[in-house]
Image: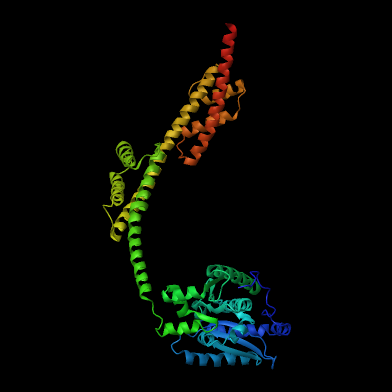
Amino acid sequence: MEESQKLPELPEELPKIPKELQKKLDALKVKLEQFKKVITKEKDKNIIGISLLPPEKENKDIINVLVLVNADHEKDPITFMDKLVKYVEKQAEDIDKSIKPRVMSLYDLRESCYDAKYEILKMIAMSAPLYDPMDVLAALRISEIHKTMSIKKFEKYIISYVAAGSLFRGEKSNDIDVYIVVDDTDVKRMSRTELRDKLGAIIRGMGAQAAEMTGIKKQFHIQTYILTDFWDSVKDAHPVIFTLLRDGVPLYDRGVFMPWKLLLKMGKIRPSQEAIEMQMDIGERLVERTRFKLLSIVGEDLYYALLNTAQAALMLYGIAPPTPKETIELLDKIFVKQEKILEKKYVDMLERIRAYYKDIEHKKVTEVSGKEIDDLLKDAEEYLKRIKKLFTQIQKKKDVENINETYDSCTKIAKEILEISNIKFTDASLLSSFKQALDKERLPENLANILKEVIDMKKTDKKLTTQEIEKIRRDSRIYMKTCVDYIQRKNLVELNKVKKEK
């Protein structure tokens, strides 16, 4: 394969609306909009696309409009289509006799592709979409343009260009999927893997070009298969390949895809014994994997969910993270017996799940039923809900301790400064006396404000939030550092005086 890996230039025959048609389109815009509204109002569930087709060479005054219809879910599609064709033609004639609608069902479009009649696809690629709620026309346009680019570049190698079945079911999707089968039987200068990777990269690059040219924003997924791999997958009954053969619609085929598709439909393509055994083996392994997952839910997920929250509660209380065994003991000792803020049954829940975990670890338990997991999960949810409440209880207790600790530290050091400054005080006059000391010793005035916050925090009946308490504690640390520095400097000065006197 000697084709350059450089992306090809954009084709000269890019689908563009001719200038004459553009002028005509502008003039007929109102009438076309009216035509669209009339027919979609009555048949909006069935009409999935309306597009302005290129003009005919013989009669350029005729405005050809494609109306794409999904009649697959109708009880009598033939009768339905006959009535719809008459209805659409009448509405077109009432609006403008020059509008000639071509009503086509998705079934007919699929059959045209099966019969290798791709002319309609080329016309859709060069058309101007007027109504496309399911993005079917957009998908057909980008696929046809990309197909043309790919075949022009690699005509010798591309065997089939296939659209995913969802495109021809009229379903709205978030992406567009196409599959390309490449002939690798005569490749000699590189390995088949290298061919697939290099050619696939170039084709995907063309896909980005096609998306840019059409302005279509949906994801355009291109899957490239080499013929030998594709054939192996057919023999091995690969589910993806069987689905592609069953539901895929060829937009281009050199006599490979359609025969396989028909052979599959006739039941002539059957999986080999090896493929059947492989699929059976996969099923057994998946069952075993499911059993292991159920065990891991109990053995790891649920156990650590309960253990970690218990350790977090102990850490909040002020204890370093304990071992799993110590966690159960401390949970019982501190919160059940000592503080009396947790019920014993929650410790038992943790102990029970730990015993389960150990039995799984030591292979005493090799499988667990869904009912057992449901019961354990129910206990775990109740346990976590109660531990959250325990967190609130611990936090309240810690808040009270923090308030008392902060108050004691701040008032104690304030008294030390007053004693150093030889200022008399009482507990009631502590704050006002402290302000005098600050003036006398030329210390920052904001220290008095911090002390006032601490005293108010202790005396107030208003419930402070944990965040408010933490803010006062941060300020109090600044207060303590400043006061301690002052006391140390003062003591150092006094010590130097004593040394000089000696």
Quadrant in the rendering for residue 329:
top left
Residue 442, percent from left and from top: 62, 23
Q: Is residue 393 visible?
A: no
Residue 152, percent from left and from top: 63, 78
Locate the C terminus by quadrant: top right
Residue 424, percent from left and from top: 52, 18
In the image, residue 48 sits, relative to residue 198, either above or below, namely: below
Q: Is residue 413 visible?
A: yes
Give 207 or 173, whichever is nearer the viewer.
Answer: 207
Residue 291, percent from left and from top: 32, 60
Locate the N terminus by quadrant: bottom right
Q: Residue at x 49, y 77 (%)?
A: 166
In the image, farthest residue toward the top? 502
Give 128 or 277, whichever is nearer the viewer.
Answer: 277
In the image, residue 73 sits, relative to residue 296, either above or below, namely: below
In the image, residue 223 sits, relative to residue 373, either above or below, namely: below
Q: Residue at x 54, y 21 (%)?
A: 417
Q: Is residue 96 left or right of residue 47?
A: right
Q: How is the image coloured?
A: rainbow
Quadrant in the rendering for residue 62:
bottom right
Give 9 or 437, whichever is nearer the viewer.
Answer: 9
Quadrant in the rendering for residue 7:
bottom right
In the image, farthest residue toward the left? 364
Count of all numbered marks drawn on residues in the image: 0
